[in-house]
Image: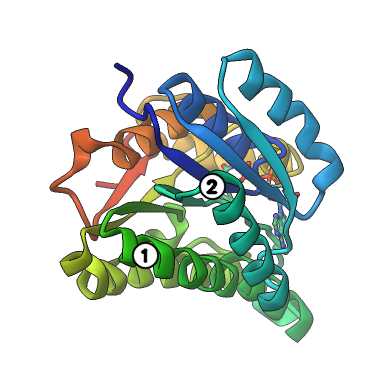
Amino acid sequence: MKILENKVAIVTGAARGIGQAIALQLAADGADLALGDVKVEWLAETAEKVRALGRRAECYAMDVANSAVVNEVVTQMAADFGHLDVLVNNAGITRDTLLIRMTEEDWDAVLDINLKGAFLVTKAVAKIMMKQRSGSIINIASVVGVMGNPGQVNYSASKAGLIAMTRTLAKELGSRNVRLNAVAPGFIRTAMTDKLSEQAKEYMLRNVPLGRPGEPEDVAKAVAFLAGDNASYISGQTLPVCGGMIW
Ligand code: NAI
């Protein structure tokens, strides 16, 4: 029996990049998938790939920063699947620029999606997991939430917030057998990092002891480990997947 057999997993921002890789790894490990993304039309590709692995996939239009939408969609997911066992808060954006040029709108957009979004989805899903007395929630943070990064004050603050949220909720929900962990990717090859300048990419790579960018699948394998019962005594932790960039 596969480690996630009979489990239902929600992945937000599952249309592409790391979110898609996570959905596929969880499906390969036996889970059925509730896929959320603000770009619902992009989700078809992920859903097809999940189904090709023999698992169920349903797609949901979900802006994680909109509480009414989040509550409605999570209720629908629970009705469609009957139970919700794993939540991966992966949806995230960047609006990079130095402090002096950063607008209030840049700050709000990143904090709303990366941090408030994870809070809203976690709150809706945790209610169900607490009643079930089981669940595993994984927040996709970033190494910059630990080490900081010039030009990313909004993004690094949102990711540091996610790490603190993970620790706090691990303490609040542990007695109901709901675990929370974070994964902190380093420099991973996706559309999000493709748009960085060559200079920024070189700067990042100089700080990677393994000397190469990571792949979305590298992050997905860590998430799948934390999602399943092999990690049943691990909660409140942040696991860096960064080629050795941070300890
Ligand atoms: P991406 O930009 O390729 O994919 C992000 C996905 O989130 C997209 O499908 C997008 O439509 C979706 N999304 C954006 N706003 C949303 C919203 N309001 N509601 C629902 N979905 C929304 O990004 P990538 O690289 O795959 O990143 C995924 C996660 O990994 C993000 O949280 C990012 O911060 C994190 N991360 C990425 C790293 C990298 O090097 N690529 C490094 C560290 C963390």
Mark number for residue 155?
none
Q: Is residue 153 left or right of residue 245?
A: right
The residue wearing badge 2 is 10
Location of residue 198 in the rendering, given as x and y in whole percent from the top left corner: 71, 37
Q: Earlier in the sequence, mark 2 or mark 1?
A: 2
Q: Single out the mark in the foreground, 2 or 1.
A: 2
Q: State the residue in front, 142 or 217.
A: 217
Residue at screen point 46% across, 51% down = 87
Regarding residue 101, the answer to whether it shows in the image is: yes
Against 116, residue 41 (above or below) is above
Q: Is residue 58 left or right of residue 117?
A: right
Residue at screen point 32% across, 66% down = 130
Q: Quarter-wise, where is residue 146 in the image?
A: bottom left
Colour scheme in use: rainbow
As shown in the figure, which amino acid type bears the numbered disc 1? Answer: Ile
Location of residue 53 in the rendering, given as x and y in whole percent from the top left corner: 57, 15
Mark number for residue 163?
1
Residue at screen point 50% across, 25% down = 27
Location of residue 76 in the rendering, given as x and y in whole percent from the top left corner: 65, 58
Q: Is residue 226 left or right of residue 157?
A: left
Distance (Cα) linking label 2 and label 1: 19 Å
Quadrant showing the N terminus: top left
Callout 1 crowding tier (Cα within 10 Å): few <14, some 14–19, many ≥20? many
Q: Is residue 144 left or right of residue 169?
A: right
Q: State the residue in front, 214 or 88.
A: 88
As shown in the figure, which amino acid type bears the numbered disc 2? Answer: Ile
Callout 2 crowding tier (Cα within 10 Å): few <14, some 14–19, many ≥20? many
Callout 1: SS: helix
Callout 2: SS: strand
Regarding residue 243, the answer to whether it shows in the image is: no
Location of residue 181 in the rendering, given as x and y in whole percent from the top left corner: 31, 54
